[in-house]
Image: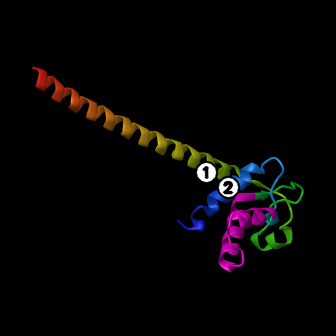
Amino acid sequence: MTVYDSLYLDILKIGRANVESGLSFVTLREKLEQKGYDFDNYYIEVAVKTWFYDTFHHALSDHGPIEYHELDSHLECNFVMKGDACLKLVSYNNSSLNNRLTLYSVILAGIALIASIIAIIVSLYYY
């Protein structure tokens, strides 16, 4: 797994952690660089800026929404995560939980199957 496999998930987690105070692109970039993302790569920076623009809303209500080309002049402003992005993160967390529960169910079903086979063999042996 490459470090970029969870880039967008990391952005959502950082955004949710900063929902009370807001999150600037500069802060997001610093936190992502601490996680090992390389912002010297132009394409990574563009991908993160685009996702940031689509996922967050300018926190100052008197400013109103900004256009993508205006983002560079608002990199230090606080943004808040949009509701649909938060719901995507909740949905991801729920699906991860469901995947773990499914794995546990399969393991328990396998154990039950083996126990029933052993019970059949033992009952045939003693009767």
- Disc 2 is placed on an element classified as helix
* Residue 17 is a magenta residue: no
Q: Main secondary structure of the magenta part?
A: helix
What residue sits right under mark 2 in the picture?
12
Q: Residues within 10 Å of mark 1 (few under 14, many from 20)?
A: few
Residue 116 in the figure: left or right of residue 98: left
Q: Residue at x 77, y 68 (%)?
A: 67
Colouring: rainbow
Above or below, 78 relative to 106? below
Q: Residues within 10 Å of mark 2 (few under 14, many from 20)?
A: many
Q: Residue at x 52, y 46 (%)?
A: 95
Could you say which quadrant of the image residue 50 lies in?
bottom right
Q: Residue at x 86, y 62 (%)?
A: 77
Above or below, 126 relative to 98? above
* Residue 53 is a magenta residue: yes
Give percent across and percent down for residue 105.
Answer: 40, 37
What residue sits right under mark 1 in the picture?
88
Q: Are marks 2 and 1 in contact (CB under 8 Å)?
A: yes
Q: Amino acid at mark 1?
A: Lys
Magenta region: 27-56
Q: Amino acid at mark 2?
A: Leu
- Taking the view exactly as shown, the residue that stands out farthest to the left is 127
- Disc 1 is placed on an element classified as helix
Residue 1 in the figure: left or right of residue 33: left
Give percent across and percent down for residue 69.
Answer: 77, 74
